Amino acid sequence: MEITSNLNVVSEICPECGGSIIALNQIGENVCSQCGLVINERGVDVNHSDKRAYTSQEKKQREHTGAPISSLLPDIGLTTVIDRKSINDPDLKRAVKWNTRITWEKRNLLIAATELKRICSNLNLPNHIKLEAIKLYKDAFKRKLLRGRSINSMIAACIYLAIRLKKIPRTLQEILEESSENEKDIRRCYRVLIRELNIKSPNTNPSALIPTYIANLNLNHEILEMATKIVNTFSTKFSTSGKDPKGIVAGAIYLACRLKGLEFTQKQIADVVGITEVTLRSRFKEISTKLNVEI
């Protein structure tokens, strides 16, 4: 089938009525000009090439559809904007005015998406975490779980849940440091998401957190390998349910430093990991006792 332009008649005829067929390259369809039968659909647009444009006409022919759609936008990036400069009719001007106003739902999603991008950007989280978090937030919004709860608290809880689901080695404390909301409110929103969305959140693997804390403490690779081995052995032989992964990691790092003769105090490790010295001592004694490690 030979196509010459956007609305040019092609050589074939309609199999239903015998009418002429026109090609609509803008929507990728070939239809009959008389009965409207769609002959072909989802055609590939061959008018746009990767050649350089030297004139305004060539540049116009190379233009594509615009910015890609994104779930992080309230309307997925499909906003319709009416140009008010060339409108003289007062009724149309009033319509343009109402068209610029957004609903509370879109405003809510816009505030949530702005906070989501800020936190994820500060934590250097990948794009699929953003998409998963905004998906969870939209589900919570549809189920009316935001009544009586802060938008920023709910979006922070969604980010943490997305991190847990995608098994990204980040802790809740890191999200709390970037969020301006209260820790109690974020934890409450997280429990609501788990319960109402019927999601089983996987436990955080403690060994995934070790490289970050090892780098912050400026320790060598030998300590990293030993601490990882201690955590994996302890997690395999004994249950870690109900125990803070950061406490297990801190206890393993402190034990590895003691075995290698490095002079690191409990306070130094506890401050970097973000736990108390009491928690570190408890996990250290538990790990060394159950693994029969003599120091």
Image (cartoon, rainbow, N blue to C red):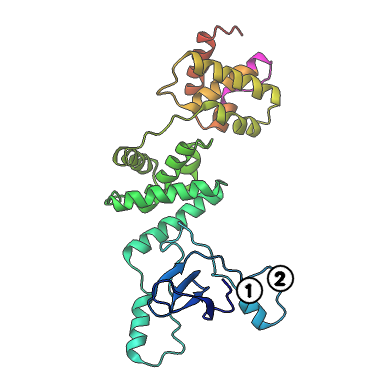
Q: Magenta segment: does it hold 266? A: yes
Q: Which amino acid does label 1 sit on?
A: Arg
- Callout 2: helix, strand or loop? loop
Q: What residue type is labelled 2?
A: Lys
Task: Check whether the beta carbons of the residues at disc 1 and disc 2 lie within 8 A of each other.
Answer: yes
Q: How far across and down, in percent of the image, does residue 138 sit?
A: 36, 52
Q: How far across and down, in percent of the image, does residue 56 sit?
A: 66, 82
Residue 33 location, quadrant: bottom left
Q: How far across and down, in percent of the image, does residue 286 sit?
A: 49, 13
- Callout 1: helix, strand or loop? loop
The residue carrying pointer 2 sits among few (fewer than 14), some (14 to 19) or many (20 or more) residues within 10 Å by Cα, namely few
294 sits to left or right of 88: right
193 sits to left or right of 168: left
Query: Residue at 50% of width from left, 16% of height from top?
Result: 236
Q: Mark 1 points at which residue?
A: 62
Of residues 93 and 228, which is closer to you in this image? Answer: 93
Q: Which of marks 1 and 2 is nearer the N terminus?
A: 2
Q: Cα distance, mark 1 to mark 2? A: 8 Å
Range of residues picked out in magenta: 258-267
Vertically, is 295 above or below 176? above
32 sits to left or right of 62: left
Q: Name the residue under label 2.
A: 51
